[in-house]
Amino acid sequence: MVRAQSQVSNELITHLSNIEDRRRNSRHSAHSSHSSHSAELRRAREILNGVSPDSQADRELERLSVAYHQNGSPSDSATSSVMFTQGGPAPMHMLHDPLNDPRHMVYPVGQTTGIDPFHSDHINNIPYTRPLSNPNPMADSAQITPPPKDQGTSMWSHKRPRILLVEDDKTCARIGAKFLHVLECSVDIAKDGLEAVEKINNPENNESFDLIFMDIIMPNLDGVSATAMIRMVTARVPIIAMTSNIRQEDIQTYFQYGMNDVLAKPFTKDSMIRVLRKHLAYMLKDPLQGGLNSDDTGQIVGAPGPPGQNQAYSNNQQAQANMMAAAAAMANSSMGSGAQVKFEQTPIPSPATTSSWHSPGQMNQTSPNMDGGGYMNAGGSGPGGMVLTPGGTQRPPPPPYQMMNNQVNNQLAGGSAGFQGGGHMQASEGMGMGGGGSDENRPEKRQRLYGPGANQGPFVQ
Amino acid sequence: MHSHYDEDQDIMPDFGEHVDNGIFEQILEMDDDDKREFSKSLVTNFFDQAEETFVKIEEILNNNKLDNGKRLETLSSLGHFLKGSSATLGFNKIRDSCQVIQQYGHKLTVDGAAEPNEQVCLEKIKAALKTARNDKDVLADMMLNETHGFFQPDDE
């Protein structure tokens, strides 16, 4: 299933690239070109049709494919489309080959040199508010919150991590949850990959999980597929494979599909502690003793994920910074669907926009609510909870001139970019790529609904 | 009566090859009361789960209407399923039999070499099931027997 999905993704990427090329060559014909260039889409559809005995999981895939289009659409900006035209494995250089990179294979020790951004001394210097507590800690029936004990000796600084444990075996799930409770984490349990994806997509979880432990072999939806789907909506939350299949090619697959680490089964409490300390160093009370050089957090937590998407995203970030002054002019240029991302750029980077895949140095400043906060909010706010507007509701309300541009861009996006969305992935529609029209405007519509009044305050300076 | 983990190292009997003591002790360490509520229910549930899985494996082995490929595939996933929980509890002998079932279900030997003969695979699985059942009975007796088992009935 994962391989098929990968193929489909490649087809879609090819499709997006082709559309981009076509639009560049002849922008005026962009409207009419939908029907004629769906070879990639047809292949993608055939792949999907060929491998889908599991209709439930398939619907999820289709739904997420819509999201993937929308998330992937920023790639249309001129700066990033080159990443896609390189095709297949090209963007993988961002991944630092997990198997040959010793940082993935050992748990680093030692002191952080220089300023440690995770240190509590600096936490108050972060120029945006940071939600310290989970607004819906008991929202989910499967969640068990341990009684707060040993507060004085807690290893966590402000907030206890919220962990999603995805495990089909009841015995393993109970033991894993118990270990995590003893480590003062709050634990949600999902009994298979499908339930995990549903939990991630649940708007009530928009505060998001801090870390996911993911079994690999599960009914309904396996862990690797679930990870690939989760990576479409949240690039940052660390996902740890829990498995006894620790052959090298297995591990390579896990990393390739967006997992960040492997916890060998049978897991022990100590091995879980090591993983938590490594990947949640920013939440530790004393990160300097966390056995972690914070540089590694940036590398490992940030590295995988859909590579093309991430890179495109970061390139967009850079492009946006340059384009801010000329936003109005750009709206009428060839930005097309990519323009919707532009408006999340603010002079002071908000948590959701401090994306720096290309820069491990900046990555160190990961704040807790960067773990999917932006993506998750967006994921929870759209139709079916799946429309992805990077930055989501964390974006400051746009100033009036930008709102005007939003409308312009909506027209551009709606007119020229059917691949941006369209509510449903119907096979008859060729992966739903042709579903232009009204739906793809929704993220921006929602933003206008919130308006300057609903979100607090004027444009953040 | 077993009030602390530290004392358990003296009290915990030697389960021999059946149990990885390090892993099992970690489970016991999670108990927050003298009655071993958590670990006892885990072990009890595991034996129930094991018996259910064994019954399913037996049904597949006896079902000649299914084609062998399908049977082996199902047997492998049943073996994998029980392998996870037995390994997590440290029940090594049962885990090893589950590994055999999983491997031959994939038409592989335990060492990972190909075993294309489906009949051989089914026989190996049948033998592994017998071993696993026996090991489970022995271990369940050591763990749960009302007079000499490691876990005693709730009323002490």
Image: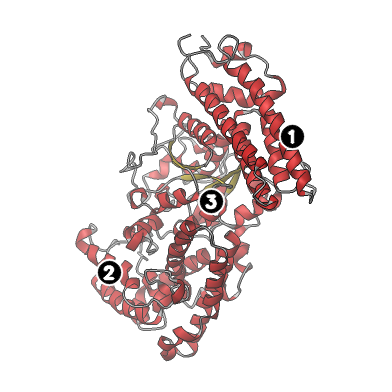
Disc on res. B127: 1
- Looking at the image, residue A39 lies above or below residue A199: below
Residue B143 location (% of width, % of height): 60, 18
Percent across and percent down for residue A137 are 34, 40
Q: The residue under label 3 is which amino acid type? A: Val
Q: Residue at x 35, y 42 (%)?
A: A140
Q: Look at the numbered disc 3 and give the secondary structure of its residue.
A: helix
Quadrant of the image containing the C terminus of chain A? bottom left
Image-based side of A458 in relation to A48, left or right: left
Quarter residue B12 falls in: top right
Q: Position of residue A127 (x, y in %)?
A: 35, 52
Circle 3 crowding by C-alpha within 10 Å: few under 14, some 14–19, many from 20: many
Which residue type carries mark 1?
Ala
Would residue A267 be seen by someone viewing this image from the given angle?
no
Spatial CA span between label 1 and label 2: 64 Å
Residue pointed to by mark 3: A301
Q: Do the residues indicated by labels 1 and 3 lie within the same chain of the protein?
A: no
What crowding class fits label 2: few (fewer than 14 Cα within 10 Å), some (14-19), or many (20 or more)? some
Say whether mark 2 and mark 1 are on the same chain: no
Tell me, yes or no, if residue A210 can be seen here: yes
Residue occupying the point 79% across, 51% down: B116
- Residues at circles 1 and 2 in contact by the CB criterion of under 8 Å: no
Q: Which residue is mark 2?
A: A445
The verdict on a common chain for dots 3 and 2 is yes
Q: Nearer the viewer, residue A301 or A72?
A: A72
Alpha-carbon span between mark 3 and mark 2: 32 Å
